[in-house]
Image (cartoon, helix red, strand yellow):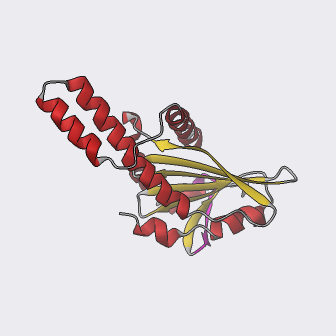
């Protein structure tokens, strides 16, 4: 049930983020525009400028998250089809990222990230209870120097990094390939993000 909720929330936020225009590179002019509009009593204009500034900051954050992911292995490609800011209040903000690695045989590995959302803090509390995890049939394993929560079928690895970043690695590729992609995530870079 909890996994279905998480998947639905990630799908909803990334689908909404796809329809947005490309963000500006520097948010400061937009923030200044919002301030001028606010002072002129143009509330709607101020809101739109601040939303665009927020998307600009989120785009920089997504770029840093992408840099922490491994390059495609030999014979594999990577597709960053869904990235964006999760501005829905239900998630408590944050950014989302979805990268799919694929080979020529139809195997894939999907890495999903939800970062800096209130939802991540809540989930980290849930996933820190080892007895509750065991009751759900999950186990823990160290992968890439980080603790991974492994689904009962072994098909998905879940990491919570610094109670700020939720990372899942799943897909149709053999378990050793999925695990290898997980091992090559730069967890130190994820931990170092401010």
Q: Give coordinates of residue 32: x percent, y percent.
A: 21, 42
Q: Is residue 117 visible?
A: no
Q: Is residue 27 visible?
A: yes
Q: Give coordinates of residue 58: x percent, y percent.
A: 41, 48
The residue lying toward the viewer, choosing from 122 and 64, is: 64
Which part of the image, by quadrant, shows the N terminus? top right
As drawn, 43 above or below 24: above
As drawn, 153 above or below 68: above
Q: Give coordinates of residue 187: x percent, y percent.
A: 52, 69
The outermost residue toward the bottom is 145
Q: What residue is drawn where x is 88% and y is 53%? A: 105
* Residue 141 magenta-highlighted: yes
Q: Give coordinates of residue 152: x percent, y percent.
A: 69, 55
Which part of the image, by quadrant, shows the C terminus? bottom left
* Residue 170 magenta-highlighted: no
Number of numbered discs on residues: 0
Q: Is residue 18 left or right of residue 118?
A: right
Q: Is residue 17 left or right of residue 122?
A: right
Q: What residue is drawn where x is 27% and y is 30%? A: 47
Q: What residue is drawn where x is 54% and y is 40%? A: 10
The residue lying toward the viewer, choosing from 34 and 135, is: 34
The outermost residue toward the left is 39
Q: What residue is drawn where x is 43% and y is 53%? A: 60
Q: Which stretch is magenta? A: 135-144
């Amino acid at each position: 049930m909890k996994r279905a909720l998480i998947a639905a929330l990630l799908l909803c936020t990334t689908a909404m983020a796809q329809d947005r225009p490309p963000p500006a590179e520097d948010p400061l002019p937009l923030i200044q525009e919002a301030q001028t509009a606010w002072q002129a009593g143009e509330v709607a204009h101020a809101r739109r400028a601040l939303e665009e500034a927020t998307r600009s900051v989120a785009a920089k954050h997504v770029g840093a998250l992408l840099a922490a992911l491994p390059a495609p292995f030999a014979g594999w490609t990577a597709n960053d089809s869904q990235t964006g800011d999760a501005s829905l209040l239900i998630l408590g903000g944050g950014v989302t990222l979805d990268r799919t690695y694929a080979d020529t045989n139809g195997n894939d590995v999907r890495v999903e990230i939800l970062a800096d959302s209130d939802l991540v803090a809540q989930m980290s509390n849930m996933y820190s209870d080892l007895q509750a995890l065991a009751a759900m049939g999950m186990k823990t394993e160290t992968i890439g120097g980080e603790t991974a929560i492994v689904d009962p079928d072994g098909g998905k690895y879940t990491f919570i990094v610094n109670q700020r970043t939720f990372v899942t690695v799943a897909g149709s590729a053999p378990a050793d390939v999925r695990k290898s992609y997980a091992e090559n995530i730069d967890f130190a870079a994820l931990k170092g993000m401010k």
